[in-house]
Amino acid sequence: MIGGILGLLALIWVYQTITKANVTNGIAWVMVCVVAYLASQFILIGAANYLIESMRASVGGEGYKADPLSVGYRQNESGFQGAKGTFMSVFFELFPPIAGFFVVAFIRTKFVLKEALTKANLFSGIGDMFRSIKDSFKNPDK
């Protein structure tokens, strides 16, 4: 859910950048960003699942069996309790969408806008995007 919302915001951001910068083949660049975002999600979510399962298996010993039929019954045991477990759970949940956002920001800055990679260039236009979303809810008749 978080990844979907962040992905939509990133693609709106790229589309608005393309329309303001008058870039040729704008829709093609949006599609490149879609593919890059989804590919990064696929790879990073798979890696996060692999890391979580390997951590649980190392704590569980030989008796741990990651049976695909018992996925819904797994409990939050071993290393995923307490402050450390909360941090790890939040990290593994938020890292893939945030990394995908950075991939889209890199493509937008380096290839679409052809600008240098600086913090200001990498995240330019995000405030304008949120303002335009906010303004789209205003009633023009009033």
Image (tube, rainbow, N blue to C red):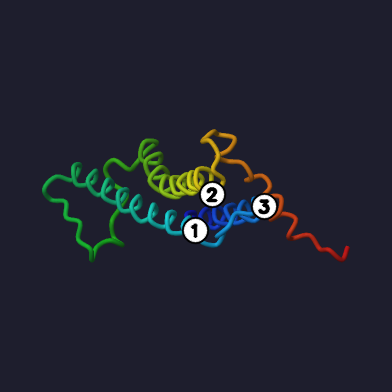
Asked whether, in this view, residue 22 is left or right of residue 85, the answer is right
Q: Residue furthest front?
A: 24
- For image coordinates 79% across by 60% down, the residue present is 138
Among the two numbered marks 2 and 1 on one chain, the one whose residue lies closer to the N terminus: 1
Q: Give the SS element for disc 2.
A: helix
Q: Distance between the residues labelled 2 and 3?
A: 12 Å
Tell me the residue that label 3 is attached to: 20
Quarter in which the C terminus is drawn: bottom right
Verify CB contact (< 8 Å) between mark 2 and mark 3. Answer: no
Q: What residue type is labelled 3?
A: Lys
Residue 70 picture location, percent across and down: 24, 63
Q: How far apart are marks 2 and 1 (CA)?
A: 23 Å
Q: Give the SS element for disc 3.
A: helix
Tell me the residue that label 1 is attached to: 4
Q: Which of 125 and 48 is in front in this view?
A: 125
Q: Which of 48 and 121 is in front in this view?
A: 121
Q: What residue type is labelled 1?
A: Gly
Q: Which amino acid does label 2 sit on?
A: Val
Could you classify mark 2 by the number of other residues whose Cα lies within 10 Å: few (under 14), some (14-19), or many (20 or more)? many
- For image coordinates 26% across by 50% down, the residue present is 50
Asked whether, in this view, residue 99 is left or right of residue 140, the answer is left
